[in-house]
Each structure stands twice: as C-alpha cells, then as structure tokens.
Amino acid sequence: MSSSANIKPISYLKANAASILADLAERREPLIITQNGEAKAVLQDLASYEETRETLALLKLLALGARDIEAGRTRPAREVVDRLRLKTSTG
C-alpha cells in the first residue's frame, strides 16, 4: 500500500473523481488523499469498506469473548448445547 500511485493530492481527486471511482472498484486498493502535502483522507470502494466493517465487527466480538474468558464468564459447551436442545424441544 505504500506505492506512490496510491497517493494523490486533493486537486487530482477533484479533477478525476469519476475515473478514480472506477479505478477503486476495479483495483480494490485504497487511495490516500493529501492536502498541502499531508495525508488527510483514505478513499476506498464500497465493497472493501463493507468488508472492513465486517472484519472489525468480528474482531470486536473476539475481543469481547477473550475478556469474558479472562473474567471467568464461561460455561461448558455441553451445558450450553443441552440448554439449547431443551429450549427447541419445549418451545
């Protein structure tokens, strides 16, 4: 991702928005936008953005699960399975 081809000034974005969007969808690589020589924003296609959001949500669930394990908030798998079976047979 450190390729200079993936870094463009905001003036390039303004002048080439339509072609940039097409390129983002095709290449699925983010584009870093600079302003006054400093990186200010990252532009990416919608599919990549959604994948990133899903990945972050899964990582958050894993982190929460790890905290539960560290805090001792767990139950044996057999107990959970038995409870679920009981619920489905009575409900």
Image (cartoon, rainbow, N blue to C red):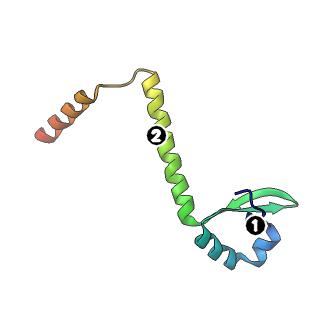
Q: Residue at x 50, y 42 (%)?
A: 59
Residue lying furthest top in this view? 72
Q: Amino acid at mark 2?
A: Leu
At 43% from the left and 25% from the top, the residue drawn is 69
| Camera sees residue 17 | yes
Q: Residue at x 50, y 35 (%)?
A: 63
10 Å crowding of disc 1: few (<14), some (14-19), many (20+): few
Where residue 64 sits: x, y (%)? 47, 34
Of the numbered discs in the image, which one, if any, rests on residue 23? none
Residue displayed at 53% across by 47% down:
56
Q: Position of residue 20 (x, y in %)?
A: 69, 74
What distance separates the C-alpha of mark 2 from that of mark 1? 35 Å
Is residue 74 positioned above or below 40 on the image? Answer: above
Residue 5, numbered circle: 1
Side (left or right) of 90 relative to 51:
left
The residue nearer to you, when weighing 1 against 44, is 1
Q: Nearer the viewer, residue 51 or 87?
A: 51
Earlier in the chain: of badge 2 and badge 1, it is 1
Picture layout, residue 55 above or below residue 73: below
The reply, left or right, for residue 75 in relation to residue 24 is left
Q: Where's residue 87, x and y in %?
A: 17, 37
Specify few, some or many for label 2: CA neighbours under 10 Å numbering under 14, 14-19, or 20 or more: few
Q: Secondary structure at mark 1?
A: helix
- Residue 61 marker: 2
Task: State yes or no: discs 2 and 1 in contact (Cβ < 8 Å).
Answer: no
Q: Position of residue 62 (x, y in %)?
A: 47, 37
Front-most of residues 31 and 11? 31
Label 2 sits on a secondary structure element that is helix
In the image, residue 75 above or below residue 41: above
